[in-house]
């Protein structure tokens, strides 16, 4: 806005000087500078507008991705027939929490969480937290690679 105001002031001054003095060498330089400033203001405004639009598109893509990931997780949890407690523990595991953090967050004993994670891993057909996370990443990266086998609902390596 300040650049646009400065460009308007310089262009008005240029026009007034041109009307009063005529076309001189000094006015040519002043006119070129004023026009260059105006062009820079317009180009800058267009770039800012493009960046704002790109940010809006990025925000929409992130929101859609969050929804897709959430839907995928819920579908797999239902497919694996996780109990409510197992689903909570599995979600914390997918988010990267370790057993102690999950126990603290759920107000449960470490042994209980370990047992729940063992059941989650068995139902998902994996044997570790990283393999559980990899199931979701694999499906997000290459959905075609996801083919249910033996009722487990995923591919095992």
Image: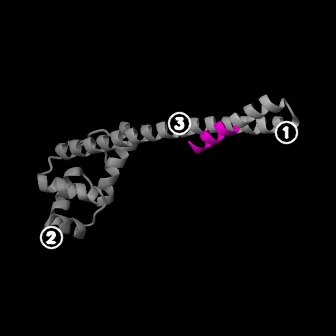
For the residue pair 43 and 66, the one nearer the viewer reads as 43
Q: Which mark is residue 97?
A: none
| C-alpha gap between disc 2 and disc 3 | 54 Å
Q: Residue under circle 2?
A: 111
| C-alpha gap between disc 1 and disc 2 | 85 Å
Is the residue 130 above or below the residue 34 in the image? below
Most extreme residue toward the right, as rendered? Answer: 25
Tag nearer the camera, 2 or 3: 3
Mark with earlier residue (1, 2): 1
Q: Position of residue 128 (x, y in %)?
A: 29, 60
Q: Residue under circle 1?
A: 26
Residue drawn at x 87%, y 34% is 24
Mark with earlier residue (3, 1): 1
For the residue pair 77 and 17, the one nearer the viewer reads as 17
Q: Residue under circle 3?
A: 50
Residue drawn at x 27%, y 45% is 70
Tag nearer the camera, 1 or 2: 1
């Amino acid at each position: 806005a300040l650049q646009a105001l400065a460009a308007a002031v310089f262009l008005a001054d240029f026009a007034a000087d041109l009307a009063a003095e005529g076309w001189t060498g000094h006015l040519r330089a002043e006119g070129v500078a004023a026009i260059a400033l105006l062009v820079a203001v317009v180009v800058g405004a267009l770039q800012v507008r493009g960046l704002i639009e790109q940010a809006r598109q990025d925000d929409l893509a992130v929101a859609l991705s969050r929804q897709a990931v959430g839907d995928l997780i819920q579908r797999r949890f239902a497919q694996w027939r996780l109990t409510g407690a197992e689903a909570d523990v599995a979600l914390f595991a997918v988010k990267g929490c370790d057993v102690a953090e999950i126990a603290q967050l759920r107000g449960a004993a470490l042994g209980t969480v370990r047992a729940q994670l063992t059941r989650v891993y068995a139902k998902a057909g994996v044997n570790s937290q990283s393999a559980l996370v990899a199931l979701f990443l694999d499906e997000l990266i290459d959905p075609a690679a996801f083919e249910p086998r033996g009722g487990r609902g995923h591919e095992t390596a």
